[in-house]
Amino acid sequence: MSTQFAPQLLADPPTVPRSVRTASALWFAAVGAGAFEATLAVAGMLADGSASLTDLAPEMGFRLTVFAVAIFMAVHLRRGRGWARIALALTLGIFGTLSLVMEPIQWLLDGNSLVQAVADAEAMTFVFAVSRIMHLAAVLAAMALMFGPAANAYFRSGSRSSRDR
């Protein structure tokens, strides 16, 4: 069976720098962590009765849309599309990062104790916190890599394959 006509969605032009490939993979990891965190939050709210599936449907739909767009942009980042790099930086790199850190910062500014929170935390709190830290680390690392010297040269040179332009 020939794979000649197989979709080339993830096929890289031959000169994609490692930093761009890694940044793309890190965006996929960030999406995975975000989906995991959303699943934990939804399961927790459903389990404790603080929300119904109907209550959560709009936010779940929004998050699924964000995840799908992020994956789309990460694929196009890897394929050398400069617009994807800028869009990822502005949307998820800036606003996404703010959404990850605003609540914990506000919680600390309200005078809560991190030491006490750790002492009182349940296992799921630790699981969520580890996922959030990994999520944030993936976003920050992807941002740094997609604007590093090799990535800048790649996007500046227009070294994409002709079929990806």
Image: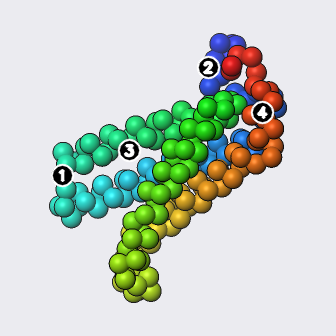
Per the image, label 4 sits on a secondary structure element best described as helix
* Residue 22 higher or lower than 99, as above or below: above
Counting from the top left corner in percent of width and height, residue 40 is at: 36, 58
Lower position in the chain sequence, tag 1 or tag 4: 1
* Distance of label 1 from label 4 (alpha carbons): 49 Å
Q: Which kind of residue does numbered mark 1 sit on?
A: Ser
Lower position in the chain sequence, tag 3 or tag 1: 1
Lower position in the chain sequence, tag 4 or tag 3: 3
Residue at image mark 1: 52
Give the label on residue 63, or none: 3
| Mark 4 surroundings within 10 Å by alpha-carbon count, few (fewer than 14), some (14 through 19), many (20 or more) | few
> Which residue sits at x=53%, y=65%?
133
> Which residue sits at x=80%, y=46%?
149
Q: Which kind of residue does numbered mark 2 sit on?
A: Pro
Per the image, label 2 sits on a secondary structure element best described as loop
> Which residue sits at x=47%, y=57%?
98
Give the label on residue 156, or none: 4
> Which residue sits at x=65%, y=22%?
8
Q: Which kind of residue does numbered mark 4 sit on?
A: Arg
Lower position in the chain sequence, tag 4 or tag 2: 2
Lower position in the chain sequence, tag 1 or tag 2: 2
* Residue 143 higher or lower than 112, as above or below: above
| Mark 3 surroundings within 10 Å by alpha-carbon count, few (fewer than 14), some (14 through 19), many (20 or more) | some
Q: Which kind of residue does numbered mark 3 sit on?
A: Arg
150 vs 51, nearest the viewer: 150
